[in-house]
Image: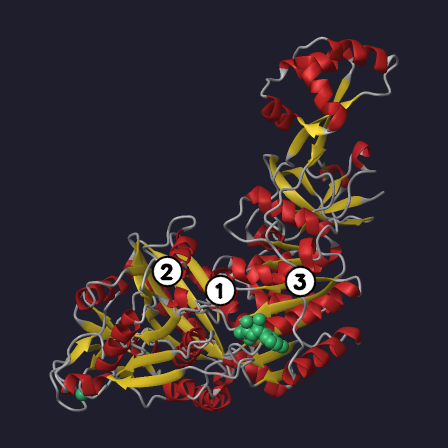
């Protein structure tokens, strides 16, 4: 006798285990691992959705206590044995339940889209006679028959539209037995291939060729160790991906290409469509749930072989996966911010291990932690040092302290102003870029560039308008806002806070004749707003595009020859230990936008801190020196990759209660901190300290070994819940979050 092993779709620790259910005889031939079922659960036998993850012969519960499956929800399995393995990995790694992980991996299931098709019923006895009789009258039924004799098997909707009739004549013919109507499942297409021309591959450069050979060798030898392609912007990484996928497909396998949502432009997808034709599909959040589900089904049924998409595309159910490629691997969006808070790069590597496929990372500015893995041997490394077109834009670093000295108090330096003016005269386009992340505002001296920062944590203080104080968002230390600069005594010490809107106003004032476009969170909330703005700019409807980091990614505008970074300091002083890395990445990517086409691009980086290593190395396009400098800093301060950082955030309406609870947690943590393996920082208010009347405070815990750190944190939280009433407190834990919380 066999029973179904079922995971119940309830998010609770106590329910996160396998439950056995009786399989009613009628379901036995139908039920498979990977199907969803409805089951009774708990004392009241409420009905819940469950996932069948296996079958077992013996059971641990008394037989009379067993309950039976109510019904099966799927026609075919929606997840595989491999999926279950992956879900188990994610459950361990991201502190979530198995059902949360399964739900994350599975698509949202949508009813199949079915169309009704009309066919002539030629097998009917005496068909021809009846047909001839009917056709000879000139009425609507004969019109339908004539149409079908040429286009047998047309959808009902199309016949109605083309013949301008209603359903009546078709049903009448069905009654007479002259036609039959069949339901057929249709899968929606999401790409338009009509305008795509097939392209032939470029002859690879020597550097491209050695990258391709190296990676293909891994593919043929089933070497699952991930490989990083470090290739400068414009070095032809995409061409390398295309070549690899070409071989993967020829060997009968399939490939997933992950790109950040923001770079998933028609331009990008086109390059894949024009090489592999209809084997390509995409999935992304702008598609409807039905469209996404259809792409998932196409992959599952082998109708396509290349899936392109952001994070969630990693879960594409290919049965013969050969490669996962992660472009722009340093992108923050590869980490999910909702439970399970997975890092798609880690998930891709795990899938590689499970399926025996290769995992390829690519970036011009690899994540410091990823590059570190190539140094420890965890990853392989291939490097492409040269741009295909060999030209690199001219990068000017503008010292804004000198501007103030010369009496220029505007946000534009003299040099940038002149360049934009020239550009307008020459009918060329300009991008002005303002990196402002979240709500953080720092305090700096406009005269000498001094920035107020917490010396314990090596991050900038954040200015809080409400009490006019500065706070460190790591350790929670606060200091008063100084009136004069502690370094040079100047009174030009101020908080920094221009937004894109302000820059747009200033731009309009300076260049009244210029047409401007603004792209930030405010102007891109609509469905296609983002694309529409870019389209307008590409078609020359504006001279100047002003925007946040959104515009730094993967865009290719041949007529742009000036790029201005209004204040590199904004990302440099974001109050995060990764700020140097973020700044280097941002500047390198922005510079990459300018030198693409035939026009020699000019980049202006305005800053109060021109000597900062992230700016100097970005100016020289020197990732390796930047990496070597940064990794030394990280080592000294024991930041990742030399440690893991846990953020434990408590959220509640009652601020006093969460502060008290966190101090209690701190006591417990200190008590169980054997050999001082772990370092605690805080409690401190979260960087957004209150949302919708809910206060947010946090403790940060650092430790060298991820597993020990996790066990320690979870253990201490358990002890806290035993000794302290945590009701009304929401606990949010994140390992190595993208942004400080
Ligand atoms: P990356 O992804 O590294 O930024 P791309 O793949 O976009 O670089 O390549 C930059 C440009 O060079 C593209 O326009 C691409 O079509 C072109 N390109 C790539 N490889 C070659 C090659 N071997 N020969 C000629 N042009 C190439
Ligand atoms: Zn100063
Ligand atoms: Zn601090």
Going from N to C along the chain, the mark reached first, 3 or 2, is 3
Determine whether, in the image, residue 224 is placed left or right of residue 288: right
Q: Quadrant of ligand 3?
A: bottom left
Cβ atoms at labels 3 and 2 below 8 Å apart: no
Disc assigned to residue 129? none
Comparing labels 3 and 2, the label whose residue is closer to the camera = 2
In front of the other: 281 or 351: 281
Q: Whole-Å distance between the Cαs marked 3 and 2?
A: 29 Å
Rendered image coloring scheme: secondary structure
Query: Is residue 91 depicted above or below 143 in this figure?
Result: below
Disc 1 designates what residue?
Answer: 333
Tell me, yes or no, if residue 696 can be seen here: yes
Disc assigned to residue 540? 2
In front of the other: 603 or 198: 198
Q: Give me the residue at 62% from left, 55% from top.
A: 98
In front of the other: 164 or 485: 164
| Secondary structure state at the residue bearing disc 2 | loop
Where residue 410 appears, as percent x and y from the top left, is 17, 75
Q: Whole-Å distance between the Cαs marked 1 and 3?
A: 27 Å
Where residue 253 appears, as percent x and y from the top left, is 76, 62
Query: Is residue 486 depicted above or below 49 in this figure?
Result: below
Disc 3 designates what residue?
Answer: 275
Q: Whole-Å distance between the Cαs marked 1 and 2?
A: 30 Å
């Amino acid at each position: 006798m066999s029973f179904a092993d079922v995971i119940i779709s309830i998010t609770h620790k106590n329910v996160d285990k396998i439950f056995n259910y009786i399989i009613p005889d009628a379901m036995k031939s139908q039920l498979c691992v990977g199907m969803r079922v409805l089951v009774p659960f708990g004392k009241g036998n409420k009905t819940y959705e469950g996932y069948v993850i296996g079958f077992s012969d013996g059971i641990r519960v008394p037989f009379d206590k067993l309950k039976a499956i109510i019904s099966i929800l799927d026609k075919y399995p929606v997840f595989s044995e491999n999926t279950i393995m992956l879900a188990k990995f994610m459950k361990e790694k991201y502190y979530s339940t198995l059902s949360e992980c399964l739900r994350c991996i599975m698509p949202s299931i949508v009813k199949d889209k079915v169309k009704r098709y009309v066919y002539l019923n030629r097998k009917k006895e005496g068909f021809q006679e009846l047909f001839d009789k009917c056709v000879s009258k000139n009425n609507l039924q004969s019109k339908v028959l004539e149409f079908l004799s040429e286009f047998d098997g047309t959808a009902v909707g199309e016949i109605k539209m083309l013949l301008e009739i209603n359903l009546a004549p078709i049903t009448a013919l069905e009654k007479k037995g002259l036609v039959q109507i069949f339901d057929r499942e249709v899968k929606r297409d999401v790409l338009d291939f009509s305008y795509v021309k097939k392209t032939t591959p470029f002859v690879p450069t020597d550097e491209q060729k050695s990258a391709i050979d190296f990676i293909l060798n891994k593919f043929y030898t089933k070497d699952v160790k991930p490989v990083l392609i470090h290739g400068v912007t414009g070095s032809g990484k995409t061409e390398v991906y295309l070549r690899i996928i070409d071989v993967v497909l020829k060997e009968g396998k399939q490939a997933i290409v992950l790109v950040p949502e923001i770079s998933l432009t028609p331009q990008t997808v086109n390059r894949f469509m024009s090489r592999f034709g209809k084997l390509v599909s995409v999935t992304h959040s702008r598609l409807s749930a039905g469209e996404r589900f259809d792409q998932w089904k196409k992959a599952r049924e082998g109708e396509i072989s290349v899936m392109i998409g952001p994070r969630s595309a990693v879960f594409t159910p290919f049965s013969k996966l050969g490669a996962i490629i992660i472009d722009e691997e340093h992108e923050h969006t590869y980490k999910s911010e909702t439970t399970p808070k997975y890092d798609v790069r880690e998930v891709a590597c795990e899938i590689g291990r499970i399926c025996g496929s290769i995992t390829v990372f690519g970036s011009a500015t690899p994540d410091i932690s990823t590059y570190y893995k190539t140094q420890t041997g965890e990853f392989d490394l291939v490097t492409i040092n040269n741009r295909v077109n060999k030209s690199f834009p001219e990068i000017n670093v503008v010292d804004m302290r000198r501007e103030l000295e010369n009496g220029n108090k505007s946000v534009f330096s003299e040099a940038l102003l002149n360049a934009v003016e020239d550009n307008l005269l020459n009918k060329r386009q300009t991008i002005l870029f303002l990196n402002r992340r979240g709500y953080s505002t720092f305090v700096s001296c406009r005269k000498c560039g001094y920035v107020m920062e917490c010396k314990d944590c090596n991050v900038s203080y954040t200015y809080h308008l409400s009490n006019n104080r500065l706070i460190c968002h790591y350790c929670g230390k606060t200091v008063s806002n100084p009136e004069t600069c502690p370094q040079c005594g100047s009174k030009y010490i101020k908080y920094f806070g221009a937004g894109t809107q302000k820059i747009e106003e200033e731009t309009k004032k300076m260049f009244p004749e210029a047409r401007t476009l603004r792209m930030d969170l405010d102007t891109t909330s609509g469905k296609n707003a983002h694309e529409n703005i870019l389209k307008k700019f590409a078609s020359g409807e504006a001279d100047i595009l002003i925007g946040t980091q959104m515009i730094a990614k993967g865009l290719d505008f041949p007529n742009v020859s000036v790029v201005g970074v209004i204040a590199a300091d904004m990302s440099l002083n974001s109050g995060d230990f990764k700020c140097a890395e973020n700044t280097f990445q941002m500047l390198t990517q922005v510079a990459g936008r300018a030198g693409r086409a035939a026009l020699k691009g000019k980049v202006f980086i305005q800053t109060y801190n021109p000597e900062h290593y992230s700016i100097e190395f970005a100016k020289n396009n020197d990732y390796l020196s930047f990496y070597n400098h940064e990794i030394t800093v990280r080592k000294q301060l024991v930041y990742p990759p030399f440690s893991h950082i846990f953020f434990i955030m408590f959220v509640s309406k009652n601020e006093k209660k969460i502060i008290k609870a966190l101090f209690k947690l701190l006591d417990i943590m200190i008590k169980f901190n054997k050999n001082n393996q772990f370092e605690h920082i805080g409690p401190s208010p979260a960087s957004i300290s209150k949302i919708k009347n809910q206060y947010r405070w946090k403790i940060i815990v650092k430790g060298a070994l991820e597993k020990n750190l996790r066990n320690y944190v979870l253990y201490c939280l358990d002890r806290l819940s035993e000794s302290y009433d945590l009701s009304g407190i929401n606990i949010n834990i994140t390992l190595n979050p993208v942004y400080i919380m």
